[in-house]
Image: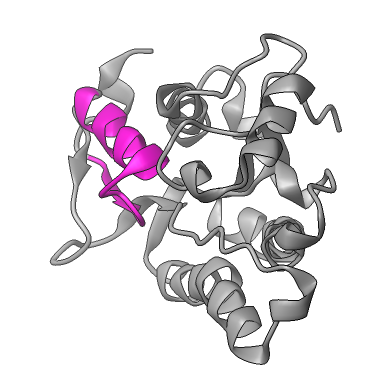
Amino acid sequence: MASSSFEGKIAIVTGASRGVGREIAIQFAKREKTLQAFSVDGVDILVNNAGLMNLYPMGQLTSEAYHTVFDTNVLAPLLLIQATLPVIKPGGSIIKISSRAARVALGGQATIYAASKAALEHMTRNLATAHAAERKITINNVLPGGIETDMIATAPQAMIDRVKNDATAEKRLGQPGEIADVVCFVAEGGGGARWINGDTISVCGGAAMW
């Protein structure tokens, strides 16, 4: 991927201090991208990566637990997109990080998390329909499977083993860099990526094929 396509552009990456978000930020930087979130004339790329994977057995579900997950995984990306739309430049890209949990049942403990990621996918379709053409931008999701980060380390071992076994490419967890590469492809807008809009790109080793 040529670095010149990113040169001089501005990206906002939420949750960039660790895991997938950190790798996305590093990959942008390697492609000569300037990463700033303030004092700029406009934004070229927004990556909504920050999220929570809090797991609750059904007997422990509370309104507070629900709002904690949905405020982080759904409301925060929506408000950030709302703030970004007026200043995003033509040719720009908004990318949200979804999850395989949005499409595959992982068990009762993942109910709130899975529902929040499913909501994120439907948000993308509606926002892309409403705003992509008028702003000359694209709005998409990237859907990871199980990724080897500290987030998945909090999941029950049985769930981690199932995620590994469900992958059809290789029986393993994905790596943050494998997600970051796809995010960069979509964000770059070249090689056909400009014709991807309102869609969810699955990067999960073949564990979710729709």
Seen from the viewer's position, the closer of residues 18 and 156 is: 156
For the C terminus, give its image quadrant.
Answer: top right
- Using the image, determine if residue 33 lies above or below residue 172: below
In this view, the residue farthest toward the top is 170
Residue at figure coordinates x 26%, y 41% from the top left: 9
Residue 128 on image: x %, y %: 69, 56
Specify whether residue 22 is painted magenta: yes
State whether residue 104 appears in this view.
yes
Rendered view: 203 above or below 58:
above
Place of residue 111 in the rendered image (x, y in percent of width and height, measured from the top left)? 77, 64
Please name whichever residue, 77 or 161, is drawn nearer the observer in this view of the structure. Answer: 161
Magenta stretch, residue numbers: 9-30
Residue drawn at x 61%, y 75% as measured from the top left = 70
Q: Is residue 46 left or right of residue 161?
A: left
Residue at 36% x, 57% y is 14
Q: Quadrant of residue 36?
A: bottom left
Residue 13 highlighted magenta (yes or no): yes
Q: Residue at x 13, y 66 (%)?
A: 39
